[in-house]
Amino acid sequence: ATPTAILVGSGIGAERGLLIRGGDVLERVHQLDTVVFDKTGTLTTGNLTLTDYLPIFQNSEWDLNSDINVGNRQDACSTIDGVSGNKQDVCSTIDGVSGNKQDACSTIDGASGNRQDACSTIDSKLLQIAAAVERGACHPIAAAILLEAQQQGLPLLAAEDFCTEPGFGVSALVEGRRVFAGNAEWMKEQGVAVATELSGSLQGKTAVYVASGGVLLGVIGLKDTLRQDAKAAVERLRGMGLRVMMLTGDTASAAAATAQQLDLRAADVLAEVRPDGKARAIATLQAQGCKVAVVGDGINDAPALAQADVGIGLHCGTDVAVETAQIVLMRNALMDVVESIELGRATFNKIR
Ligand code: ADP
Ligand code: MG
């Protein structure tokens, strides 16, 4: 391609909301044969909703001021209809002024909006503690938990000394106690046992475990939704002869739930991959001769975006991801991945 053709290509890209950085990007786009998508925040909206709320607080110091029978808690609030998958209103509401629990933990039929059955009052303390820790994180999970706590009018607990471990979770001092929130591996690292039946009941969801003082305070289950154009974009890319893959730090079970909606084969799904592992996974594909684009949004995607032959970042993503990418999708539309590749092909095929 002539420099002029490349300039023209980049110009067309800019008009379509594709920020293309560097003269050789479109040529590399033209050579791609594999597109690897991050899951959370890329294939999905990243606007997670709380679906499960399981306070445990067994043998925990946090239990001291609670007026709730510990024995009732584990099964206190099962909030999703496993068959329909309807989201149901989760936790008890708390009067923000008085701090009184309002015994409102009912399940709501997603279709009719009717209350189905009231379950026992549950403690919102778990959500409050989780929100306090997540305040220190910049992650879709953190945003979802903070939003839920805010919507319930829960007062924020004092927290300090935040620490984030990308791909695992977060920790902070909450009311003077060290609290950890994150995945099962993060719990394991803190020496906290996670019962397998807990992860079983959270099949297909993202589980956030909360622990302090070596014991599990509870689990929060979250569910994500696909971006509206995810399926169409994946199909178009396949139609263009590209291999489409998904790479995520989330559990295999949550990954499989998303993969199924996109008709991705198990062989094309890599789950429970840590941020550095994401870059290595891309390097492995490249060593097999693949020309790989990575599409991502998060801090955790930055190493993979840098490793890729073409890094494609969503504009709404974390600064580091946006800075690392060679193509930035200003409209945050996955269809623009298709556009980018078509542009690369058009620019280079014309000149040949
Ligand atoms: P993804 O690859 O899906 O974007 P990440 O690499 O950011 O996911 O995170 C992988 C997993 O680490 C998450 O699914 C979650 O279990 C855990 N995790 C990461 N950040 C947090 C957080 N702030 N709070 C709780 N869990 C977290
Ligand atoms: Mg992500």
Image (cartoon, rainbow, N blue to C red):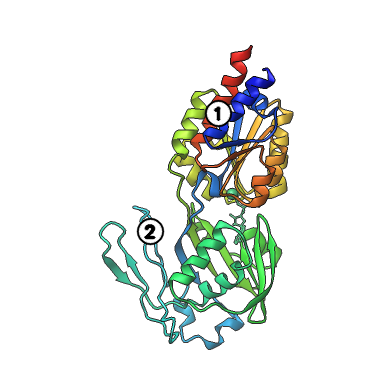
Residue 31 visible to the viewer: no
Q: Mark 1 falls on what kind of element? A: helix
Q: CA distance from mark 2 to mark 1?
A: 42 Å
x then y, percent, for residue 290: 67, 27
Circles 2 and 1: CB atoms closer than 8 Å: no
- Tell me: is circle 2 under 8 Å from ligand 1: no
Mark 2 Cα-neighbour bin, 10 Å: few <14, some 14–19, many ≥20: many
Horizontal side of 224 relative to 22 (left or right) equals left
Q: Nearer the viewer, residue 329 or 110?
A: 329
On the image, numbered disc 2 is attached to which residue? 87
The amino acid type found where label 2 is placed reads Lys
| Vertical order, 237 against 43 (above or below) | above
Q: Provide residue 338's location: percent of width, then percent of height.
A: 52, 30
Disc 2 is placed on an element classified as loop
Circle number at residue 12: 1
User: What residue appears at the point 72 percent right and 38 percent down from the top-left corner?
Assistant: 307
Q: Quadrant of residue 114?
A: bottom left
Residue 141 on image: x %, y %? 55, 59
In this view of the protein, which residue sits in the foreground, 40 or 269?
Answer: 40
> What amino acid is at disc 1?
Ile
Q: Is mark 1 within 8 Å of ligand 2?
A: no
Mark whose residue sits in front, 2 or 1: 1
Asked if residue 265 lies left or right of residue 308, the reply is left
Say which residue appears at 45% left-offset and 76% top-offset: 153
User: How many dots with numbers?
Assistant: 2
Q: Residues within 10 Å of mark 1 (few under 14, many from 20)?
A: few
Q: Nearer the viewer, residue 346 or 155?
A: 346
**Residue 12 falls left or right of residue 190:** left
Residue 292 has which mark?
none
Is 337 located above or below residue 298 in the figure? Answer: above
Q: Is residue 289 above or below residue 310?
A: above
